[in-house]
């Protein structure tokens, strides 16, 4: 029955040109395709998908089959594996890489604790294939993928004994080894840039994302790992992982002595530090120091002429970190009554000023660390009221994005068994969500300036719609959904369409101006006006690059927004 339905919808859609498929077409294709796969008809599904007449259908709708396809591949049923792998390969070749990226990362995010390792290792190669298809515009997508993958891998228990590392029951060692293969082509790309130019810009986007990956790996899982020396465990995947992380840092232009040097900590510049990860977290550098001086990892690429005094100076920051951890207040222990004291709210506000205005990067990073620590110490009700207050008073998109990310973490915690509470579920949560899911100036909001806030808000909404099932509605999101659509999603869609059209028009004009300027040697510098403001003089190539970056940013927003709209449409359509 399902196979007949799939054949019918495909045959009907063959007559539709371009991307004119209706929501019903998407729904029928997904439902019939999923049922066919679940019933073991993968060979017939593959035959339909590879038919050249159906290429446009597969390009537009095929990525929706990723969910059921991954679930079947995880079951490892021998009779279906070859055909299912062939289907996945075909989808990776034909479908839009942006849609594939969103779909694959959703599968990684949704993996339960017992299947994290299998899901990650299964999807690493497909993710790598998709990211390589993005060409030169892949840096931010690589960063998003690495962040998602590491967040899941960090949930796996860390082996303590030699036997546990050898057995690798929970799969952490296997995941770490696979991650190194995953990042290899991206590391090689940055290394080629170093070879060609003898140096590479510290702000090269792909280099920055790989640096974040290394720093986050040093924080988790390596900070929690007690590495075994070769005499105890000859072949140690975790030791190999630590070694390769340090080699990658060196390969992408990070000097290990400079990373540990206090002077370099003061010199480094970190534009946009309120991104998902700070470039140089102190815990990561502390782990780096431990790997070098205690475990003697990668000592062959570290100078042996450094004096003991210099080494001590490098490590004083981390000694201070260790000592300060001994006097920390217990998490979730500070009651809401303390927020009535002026200092308990003014201190975080002053920390925000340090994080956003202080010219000293070291102090900015310390400020962010203390800010998060202060959040962790509040109990649930205090966190709730603190978040509300910060969203109303911070007036900084990066800070607001950081607060929204914390809200998502609290909701995620509250939805887990035995963690329910009255503040991040149900009626109390909805007023907080209204502060999160809003545009400061409606459709005319500057989307680029508010990018951090918008992306975190959309990620939160997408997570809640996926995690909190409509029939459970623990958060109340489904009750509030019609208001969210009217007050947030529709104005955002309008603003996104206007902004994208504006920048695409500017980009087209810039390319035309470049053609004209190439004929006139005097026209080597030009200006561009965006939102009634003139940008600094720049060459046509620089101007085009800036505008292309803006358009690509709008595409990223649109990819998540479109996914949310699809989830809502699927839920709102009556079952046939």
Image (cartoon, rainbow, N blue to C red):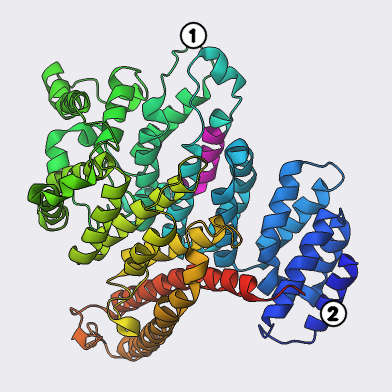
Residue 208 can be seen in this image: yes
Would you name the residue on which mark 2 appears? Answer: 11
On the image, the x and y values in percent for residue 406 come to 34, 51
Which structural element holds mark 1? Answer: loop
- Is 109 situated left or right of 545 in this image? right
Q: Is residue 180 magenta?
A: yes
Residue 274 can be seen in this image: no
Q: Work out whether residue 26 or residue 272 is closer to the camera in this orientation and state it.
A: 26
Q: Quadrant of residue 55?
A: bottom right
- Is 16 situated left or right of 283 in this image? right
Q: Give the main secondary structure, helix, strand or loop, of the magenta stretch.
A: helix
- Is 466 situated left or right of 359 in this image? right
Q: Work out whether residue 32 or residue 253 is closer to the camera in this orientation and state it.
A: 32
Tell me the quadrant of the picture where the C terminus can be found. Answer: bottom right
- Eyeballing the image, is 130 above or below 117? below
Q: Is residue 533 magenta?
A: no
Which structural element holds mark 2? Answer: helix
Q: Residue at x 41, y 61 (%)?
A: 427
- List the single residue furthest toward the top: 231
Would you name the residue on which mark 1 appears? Answer: 232
Q: Residue at x 26, y 65 (%)?
A: 397
Q: Residue at x 31, y 60 (%)?
A: 401
On the image, the x and y values in percent for residue 336 come to 23, 47
Q: Which residues are magenta?
A: 175-188
């Amino acid at each position: 029955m399902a196979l007949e339905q799939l054949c019918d919808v495909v045959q009907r859609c063959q007559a539709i040109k371009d991307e004119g498929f209706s929501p019903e077409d998407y729904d029928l294709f997904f439902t019939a395709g999923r049922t066919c796969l679940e019933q073991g008809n993968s060979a017939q599904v593959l035959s339909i998908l590879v038919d050249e007449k159906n290429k446009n259908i597969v390009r537009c709708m095929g990525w929706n089959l990723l969910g059921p396809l991954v679930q079947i591949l995880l079951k490892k049923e021998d009779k279906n594996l070859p055909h299912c792998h062939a289907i996945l390969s075909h989808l990776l070749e034909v479908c839009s890489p942006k849609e594939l990226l969103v779909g694959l990362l959703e599968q990684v995010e949704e993996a339960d604790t017992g299947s994290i390792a299998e899901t990650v290792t299964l999807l690493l190669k497909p993710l790598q294939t998709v990211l390589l298809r993005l060409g030169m515009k892949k840096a931010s997508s690589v960063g998003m993928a690495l962040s998602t993958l590491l967040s899941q891998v960090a949930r796996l228990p860390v082996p303590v004994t030699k036997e546990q590392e050898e057995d690798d029951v929970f799969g952490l060692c296997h995941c770490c080894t696979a991650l190194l293969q995953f990042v290899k082509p991206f590391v090689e790309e940055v290394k080629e840039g170093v070879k060609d130019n003898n140096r590479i810009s510290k702000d090269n986007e792909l280099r920055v994302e790989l640096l974040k990956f290394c720093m986050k790996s040093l924080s988790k899982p390596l900070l929690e790992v007690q590495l075994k020396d070769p005499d105890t465990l000859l072949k140690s995947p975790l030791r190999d992982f630590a070694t390769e992380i340090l080699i990658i840092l060196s390969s992408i232009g990070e000097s290990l002595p400079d990373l540990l040097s206090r002077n370099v900590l003061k010199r480094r510049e970190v534009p946009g530090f309120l991104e998902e990860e700070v470039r140089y977290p102190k815990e990561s550098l502390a782990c780096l120091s431990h790997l070098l001086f205690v475990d003697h990892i990668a000592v062959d690429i570290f100078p042996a002429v450094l004096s003991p005094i210099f080494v001590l100076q490098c490590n004083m920051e981390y000694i201070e970190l260790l000592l300060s951890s001994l006097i920390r207040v217990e998490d979730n222990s500070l009651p809401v009554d303390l927020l009535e004291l002026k200092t308990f709210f003014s201190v975080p506000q002053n920390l925000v000023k340090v994080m956003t205005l202080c010219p000293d990067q070291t102090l900015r990073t310390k400020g962010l660390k203390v800010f998060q620590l202060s959040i962790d110490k509040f109990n649930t009700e205090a966190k709730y009221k603190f978040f509300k207050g910060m969203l109303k008073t911070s007036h900084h998109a990066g800070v607001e994005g950081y607060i929204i990310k914390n809200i998502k973490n609290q909701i995620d915690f509250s939805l887990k068994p035995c963690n329910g509470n009255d503040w991040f579920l149900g009626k109390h949560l909805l007023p907080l969500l209204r502060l999160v899911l809003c545009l400061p100036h409606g459709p005319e909001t500057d989307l680029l300036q508010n990018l951090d806030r918008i992306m975190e808000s959309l990620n939160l909404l997408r997570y809640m719609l996926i995690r909190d099932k409509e029939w459970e509605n623990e958060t109340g999101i489904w009750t509030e959904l019609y208001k969210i659509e009217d007050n947030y999603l529709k104005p955002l869609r309008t603003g996104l369409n206007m902004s994208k059209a504006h920048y695409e028009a500017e980009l087209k004009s810039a390319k035309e101006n470049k053609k004209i300027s190439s004929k006139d040697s005097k026209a080597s510098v030009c200006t561009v006006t965006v939102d009634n403001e003139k940008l600094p003089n720049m060459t046509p190539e620089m101007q085009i690059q800036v505008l292309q970056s803006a358009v690509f940013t709008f595409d990223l927003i649109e990819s998540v927004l479109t996914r949310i709209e699809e989830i809502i449409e699927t839920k709102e359509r009556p079952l046939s």
